[in-house]
Amino acid sequence: MRMERGRFNRIPRTAPRARGGWCKLAGVTKLFLPQAQLEEWALADKADLREGKLVVMAEGGVSFPVTPAVHFVQLVSGEDSQGLVARVKTEEQLARLGAEQMADSVLVGDNAYEVVPGYVTEVASAPRPEGGAKKPDSEADLLAAFILNKMG
């Protein structure tokens, strides 16, 4: 999963990495949402975090589970031997790495990274018929349309 500043991307783990696009992994769509963007949406009454879920008001209060995570933007010092730059890791994954997060920084051993705090949401994806029209027909499609078209 990759995120350019101001854009949300889904990238399949099994496919070559490319800019833009969405990732469909075994019926699940994963999306990184920066904390700053979520705060803007909350102030505009577009979406909010409630009880561990992203609630999208524009879609009738549809909710999606979220997990705290960080997007590794750049290496500040040390060596990126684990290839973390341009990756997203959840708090659980950070703990397994022995990483320490402090605001917009993460320390992994002697290496320091600049990160963007946020959340990862996973939503079930409905399969699309081959050659069919691409109209929103699942909660994942609705969330993607909301984020890309209404809030971007």
Image (cartoon, grey):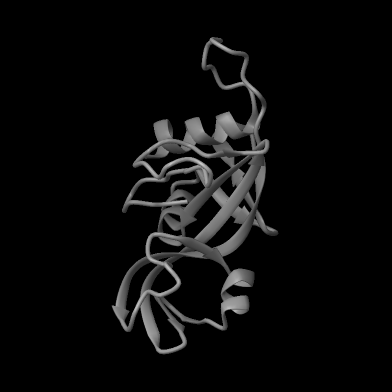
Left or right: 144, with 93 as reference point: left
Q: Nearer the viewer, residue 106 or 50?
A: 106
Q: Is residue 102 above or below residue 36?
A: below
Q: Residue furthest bottom?
A: 110
Left or right: 72, with 121 as reference point: left
Residue at position x 41%, y 75% from top? 81
Residue at position x 52%, y 39% from top? 23
Q: Nearer the viewer, residue 142 or 56?
A: 142
| Count of labels in the image | 0
Residue at position x 62%, y 14% from top? 129
Quarter residue 59 falls in: top right
Quarter residue 63 falls in: top right
Q: Is residue 26 above or below residue 76?
A: above
Q: Position of residue 128 (x, y in %)?
A: 62, 19
Q: Position of residue 22 (x, y in %)?
A: 48, 37
Left or right: 55, with 16 as reference point: right
Instruction: Give the quadrant of the C terminus.
Output: top left
Q: Position of residue 136 (x, y in %)?
A: 56, 22
Q: Nearer the viewer, residue 40 or 128?
A: 128
Left or right: 110, with 55 as reference point: left
